[in-house]
Image (cartoon, helix red, strand yellow):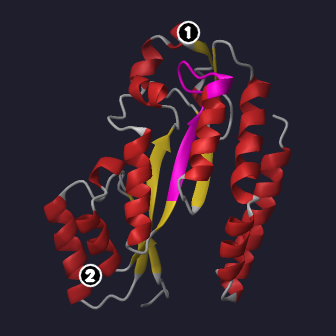
Amino acid sequence: REYGIRDLMLLDDNFILNRKKLFDTCDGMVKEKMNLTWYCMGHARFMTEERLRKIREAGCWFIEMGIESGCDRILKVLKKNTTKDEIAAAVRTARSVGLKVKGNFIFGLPTETKESLDETIDFAAGIGLSYFQQNFLTIWPGCELATDPERYGRAITDWGAMAHQRITFVPHGLTEEDLLAASRKAFRRFYLRPGVILAILASLRSPRALVTTGVAALTFLKTIGRRR
């Protein structure tokens, strides 16, 4: 009330994982009549209709998914414990209860190829996502891949150079330009579709929305024009 906050992000990698915590939290928000809108993150395997309806009832308007890849072979390499079909079904379920869905993807994953990149781009554009985000693989010290990154490609392991928007790992058989080209293609393919553009325009219902969408548009133009 003091700061006028009306929309929140619940910063939990998988907010919907624990059913009891999820229902207790949502029921509490409804009981307290908080009247907030919010969004959260969740894994496809836990995006059941029951749980998604519960978060929608409590004010959630979109859910963010770490999809990573649209290639089943790479999903197995990542040990995601999910498949393309399960991910697509989760997106459909979320949309059926009135939620928007953002899909996060990583380009340059171990065993990545030009073909798997194209498969991921097609998948992202074809499963009904409302928003698309893509970053490049960053091999943070301490993760499993950091023990032997050269097995899968060329890596930069300098802490100071690491950032998800910067290419610091290039899989064998690909180049930095291959990854950048795929990134540019993915953003163009997803956001320059008439349906997506119309949905964005329909959401411009306040001066604040107009400003934030303008900033996002500038970022988009920089992204599809980047050369490094």
- Left or right side of 6 for 90: left
Percent across and percent down for residue 172 are 63, 12
- Give the Cα separation between the discs numbered 1 and 2: 48 Å
Mark identifier at residue 29: 2
In this view, the residue in front, 75 or 148, is 75
Percent across and percent down for residue 134 are 62, 45
> Could you say whether the residue bearing mark 2 is in a helix, strand or loop?
helix
Disc 1 designates what residue? 150
- Badge 1 crowding class, 10 Å Cα cut-off, few under 14, some 14 to 19, many 20 or more, is some
Residue shown at 63%/43% (left/top)?
122
Vertical side of 119 occupied by 87: above or below: below
Residue shown at 39%/37% (left/top)?
83
> Magenta segment, which residues?
102-115
Residue shown at 46%/57% (left/top)?
64
Asked if the magenta segment contains residue 108, the reply would be yes
Percent across and percent down for residue 58 are 31, 79
What residue type is disc 2 on?
Met
What residue type is disc 1 on?
Glu
